[in-house]
Amino acid sequence: MPEIIVLEGVVKKYGDKPAIDGLDLRVNEGDIFGFLGPNGAGKTTTVRVVATLTDFSEGKISVGGHDVMKKPKEAKKLMGVIQQQISLDKDLTVRENMVHHAMMHKIPANERKKRIDEIAEYVGLSEYMDRMIDSLSGGWKKRAAIVCSLIHEPKVLFLDEPTAGLDIKARRLLWDLIRKLNEGGTTIFLTSHYIEEVEALCNMVGIIDDGKLIAHGTPAELCNRVGSTAVEYYGADGHTEYRYFSSRNDAKDFAATIDDMNTVLIRNTSLEDCFVELTGKKVGGN
Ligand SMILES: Nc1ncnc2c1ncn2[C@@H]1O[C@H](COP(=O)(O)OP(=O)(O)OP(=O)(O)O)[C@@H](O)[C@H]1O
Ligand SMILES: [Mg+2]
């Protein structure tokens, strides 16, 4: 599949401090790409520079072959963005927000109603169209934000922490919607602190730390970077220790050297192990 998002050496600074620092990143068309990183790593800033919501000082970004600096209009047409803080008008209904988005994207008036109704039906929001945004629960607010961002039929959808704070049922409903959109041909760029979300949805993953890409690959490739098998046990100081091995036999040999076998767990490595090993930080923590 061709590349649809390409970042080369991108630098974005706030004051003197780089929020992203020479970032190289490529996302293929058709992917559900998961972007992981600790708080403040630069995930939202990356989404914002690619989606042309903020500028950057160095490097090059292209979306669908359009340089976002030189051809912002063409690039913008291909992108839909659901930001970490939902930017819908709370005092308007879902339909009114959609009309507003349709006007922003210059969808002709005679096409608007048909397109709005079709998209609302597609994402299962028809019954909620005349509700005020403020009256919706968090999960439905996210759905409303998604329908608005789909009005111009983008090829790439950016979702910045789409399920943060949602309960499990609402989260799973959104996962189904994300899968459905992807199956319909939309490339998804998703940031998340939920490792199980990335494992459930994403075929490619990038890990960013301090504004730099520190790992990129399929979930299986990233797990294999730390080894196939993990040994988890209580260390001498009462903390859980983790050791990683390239074979189950090596892991078993090591486990046999631990005094208290009752505390030992041998298991396959996960994306979380890779995240913690590479960043030295817990997912979502510092
Ligand atoms: N508008 C801003 N003004 C000044 N500094 C900013 C601004 N936005 C982000 N930063 C800084 O840039 C860095 C990257 O922030 P960013 O929001 O991109 O991180 P993040 O990975 O999305 O974090 P989180 O997981 O908490 O959402 C941080 O050091 C942050 O403080
Ligand atoms: Mg963020």
Image: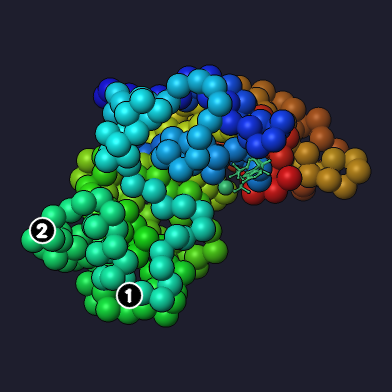
Which residue in the protein does label 1 denote?
93
Q: Is residue 189 above or below residue 149?
A: above
Quadrant containing the N terminus is top left
**What colour scheme was applied to this rendering of the protein?**
rainbow
How many numbered tags mark residues here?
2
Between residue 188 and residue 258, name the one nearer to us.
188
In the rendered structure, the answer to whether residue 266 lies left or right of residue 221 reads: right
Please give the label number shown on residue 111: 2
Q: Residue at 55% across / 40% down in the picture? A: 45
Measured from the top left, where is residue 170 in percent x and y?
42, 66
Q: Cα distance, mark 1 to mark 2?
A: 19 Å
Question: SS for tag 1?
Answer: loop
Label 1 amino acid?
Answer: Thr
Question: Tag 2: Cα neighbours inside 10 Å, few (<14), some, or many (≥20)?
Answer: few
Residue ranking furthest to the left: 110
Q: Quadrant of residue 6?
A: top left
Residue 31: image quadrant is top left
Q: Position of residue 9 (x, y in %)?
A: 53, 19
Q: Earlier in the sequence, mark 1 or mark 2?
A: 1
Query: Where in the figure is residue 37, as x and y percent of width and height?
Result: 60, 39
Residue 64 in view (yes/no): yes
61 vs 85, left or right, is left
Foreground of the two, 165 or 255: 165
Secondary structure state at the residue bearing disc 2: helix
